[in-house]
Amino acid sequence: MNSEDVKIEQEFSITPLMQPGIAKIAMNYLTSRQGTEFALLPAFDPIRRFVRYPPGSLT
């Protein structure tokens, strides 16, 4: 670290309300890196379902 660098540490909890959003970000990243065809594999169906219909949602 030089004299212009600043180090910041922060602790936080990931709540159940945040989990679908984090999963969506992860799926978007996966798609951008591996492509749509890969991200649409059936292995990822549970994650897509979790993002689209989070537990406790009204839909």
Image: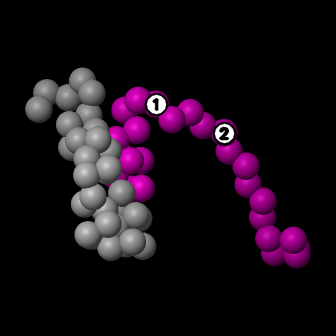
Residue 44 lies, in percent from the top left, at: 31, 50
The C terminus: image quadrant: top left
Residue 48 lies, in percent from the top left, at: 26, 47
Quick check: 20 above or below 37? above
Type of the residue with mark 2: Glu
Quick check: 25 left or right of 4?
A: left
The N terminus: image quadrant: bottom right
Q: Please say whether residue 55 is one of the residues in the magenta stretch.
A: no
Residue 26 lies, in percent from the top left, at: 42, 56
Q: Residues within 10 Å of mark 2 (few under 14, many from 20)?
A: few
Find the magenta span and give its range: 1-26
**Residue 2 visible in the picture:** yes
Residue 48: mark in rendering: none
Q: Residues within 10 Å of mark 1 (few under 14, many from 20)?
A: few
Residue 23 lies, in percent from the top left, at: 38, 47
Residue 15: mark in rendering: 1
Residue corresponding to mark 2:
11
